[in-house]
Image: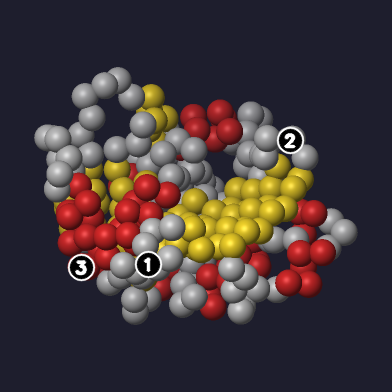
């Protein structure tokens, strides 16, 4: 566990203006960590990093030029790697693939919305024939539409299981689960009188841990490769402060 001082240290990246913000209690870096909205949604593919990069190249090899560039970055704690994605953009242009544990690769991107891992997870799972995971948690303090989500992909890149709990189109808390129930699921929670308690951040972390993913443990993340996509049209860019003010007016400077 990182010391409080280490948690609040500003990452070595000149365009981070609020990275020194304290983490919520018990939160390391993802799913509402101190660099939010970075890491609110994270993808994982069951591939070692080298194989994930090889598969990513296969996926993008047929794209029209200019094709993505790949850059290995120095080993550093994830909290110091994520600022390489800044500024936040729409459409997003950067992904960071990070080794995770013994057999997974984590996928982050610089979407203004906190991450859009679906395309990469689905395609890499399909091409490599391996499982994929989309995991997300947006706290109510950071966005008026909070949500906790877990989507599992099979080896063909199709949904195998989806669990969603949050405030969506209806404007009220809702819970939905579809697909094949997994043996690690805590079924009793799904009938909680409080809808928001049917799938929580802590449950998400336990489910991921059952898959071999320690998403909230900084030491589980290793080497990384930064992928840059070059787009020719005008993009909307934002610093962390700007994205926070847009997502949760009045809370960005807390």
- Which label sits in the foreground, 2 or 3? 2
Residue lying at 46% horizontally and 77% vertically, measured from the top left? 212
Q: Tell me the quadrant of the picture where the C terminus can be found.
A: top right
Residue 190: x %, y % from top left: 76, 64
Visual colour scheme:
secondary structure
Q: In the image, 71: left or right of 240? A: left
- Does residue 83 show up? no
> What residue sits right under mark 1 in the picture?
155
Q: Secondary structure at mark 2?
A: loop
Residue 150: x %, y % from top left: 56, 59
In the image shown, does 244 or 182 lie closer to the viewer? 182
> What residue sits right under mark 2 in the picture?
170
Residue 205: x %, y % from top left: 58, 68
Q: Residue 207, located in which quarter of the rendered image? A: bottom right
Distance from Cα at disc 2 to Cα at disc 1 = 33 Å
Q: Earlier in the sequence, mark 2 or mark 1?
A: 1
Q: In the image, 9: left or right of 249? A: left
Q: In the image, 158: left or right of 167? A: left
Q: Which mark is residue 176?
A: none
Q: Secondary structure at mark 3?
A: helix
């Amino acid at each position: 566990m990182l010391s409080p001082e280490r948690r609040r240290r500003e990452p070595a990246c000149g365009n981070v203006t609020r990275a020194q913000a304290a983490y919520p209690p018990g939160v390391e870096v993802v799913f509402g960590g101190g660099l939010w909205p970075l890491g609110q949604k994270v993808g994982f593919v069951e591939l070692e990093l080298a194989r994930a990069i090889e598969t990513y190249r296969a996926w993008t090899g047929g794209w029209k030029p200019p094709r993505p560039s790949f850059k290995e970055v120095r080993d550093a704690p994830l909290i110091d790697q994520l600022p390489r994605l800044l500024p936040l953009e729409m459409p997003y242009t950067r992904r960071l693939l990070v080794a995770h544990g013994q057999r997974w690769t984590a996928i982050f991107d610089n979407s203004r919305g906190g991450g859009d891992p679906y395309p990469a997870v689905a395609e890499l799972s399909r091409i490599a024939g391996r499982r994929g995971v989309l995991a997300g948690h947006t706290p109510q303090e950071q966005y008026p539409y909070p949500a906790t989500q877990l989507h599992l992909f099979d080896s063909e890149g199709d949904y195998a299981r989806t669990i969603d709990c949050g405030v969506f189109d209806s404007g009220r808390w809702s819970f939905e689960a579809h697909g094949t129930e997994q043996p690690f699921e805590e079924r009793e929670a799904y009938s909680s009188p409080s809808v928001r308690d049917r799938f929580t951040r802590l449950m998400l972390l336990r489910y991921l841990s059952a898959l071999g993913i320690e998403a909230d443990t900084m030491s589980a993340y290793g080497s990384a490769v930064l992928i840059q996509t070059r787009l020719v049209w005008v993009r909307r860019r934002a610093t962390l402060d700007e994205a926070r003010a847009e997502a949760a007016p009045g809370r960005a400077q807390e």
